[in-house]
Image (tube, rainbow, N blue to C red):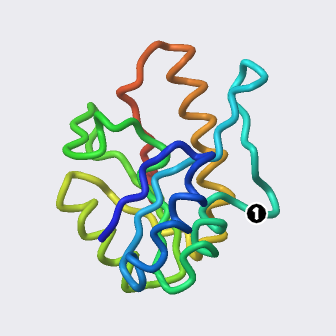
Amino acid sequence: MVFLAVLGSAAVEVASALATEIETKVVVDTTNPLDFSSGSPALFVGHTDSLGERVQRALPTARVVKAYNTVGNALMVDPQLPGGPPTMLIAGDSEDAKTAVGDLLEATGWDVADLGGIEASRYLEPLCLAWVSLASRTANWNQAFKLLRG
């Protein structure tokens, strides 16, 4: 398992450079296409494409899973928050890869919700904007989303 944890604007270039070394590995894409050039966070890709899909295209034989992109690094492992375990939303085309990433997430304190194929990164990446906006406004970066199921 390989974690892609780089600046979003460098993600495709880094993935392309590592394509032969990564081959068929599970690649956990933690990146977001954030653009702060206007002063407020925005996305440099979205709606009809996503950075997750671009990373998958750069790594055609790897099994990319978008995860960890809606939480800060301090909570990636052992996310102890009031209200119980937060939910990590994931997306990817390989069911086996999503199972492996889901098992890791659950072993480190997360609830997991699978949104489907890698194209669901189109939903996860904008969700990061909501997380950044709230964290910036409240000065609290130790927060995560929780999906309540009925």
| Quadrant of the drawing holding the N terminus | bottom left
Residue sitting nearer the eye, 83 or 124? 124
- Between 56 and 58, the one lying in front of the other is 58
What type is the residue that disc 1 sits on? Asp
Q: Position of residue 74 (x, y in %)?
A: 29, 34
In the shown orientation, is residue 30 left or right of residue 134? left
Up-down: is 6 above or below 38? Answer: below
Quadrant location of the C terminus? bottom left
Tally of numbered tags: 1
Q: Is residue 89 above or below residue 102?
A: above
Image side of residue 147 versus residue 101, left or right: right
Q: Please provide percent x and percent y for residue 4.
A: 42, 57
Instruction: Find residue 16 and report its image quarter.
Output: bottom right
Which residue shows up at 37% across the image and 85% down it?
A: 96
Callout 1: few (<14), some (14-19), or many (20+) C-alpha neighbours within 10 Å?
few
| Nearer to me, 98 or 29 | 29
Is residue 107 found left or right of 25 in the rendered image?
left
Whether residue 150 is visible to the viewer of this picture, yes or no, is: no
Residue at image position (25%, 41%) is 79
User: Which residue shows up at 54% across the image and 81% down it?
Assistant: 93
Residue labelled with disc 1:
49
Residue 31 appears in view? yes
- At which x and y percent is residue 141? 41, 24
Q: Residue at x 29, y 76 (%)?
A: 100
In the image, 12 versus 63, the foreground residue is 12
Residue 133, above or below 70: above
- Name the secondary structure under disc 1: loop
Q: Find residue 119 and report its horizontal and vertical position in percent.
A: 66, 70
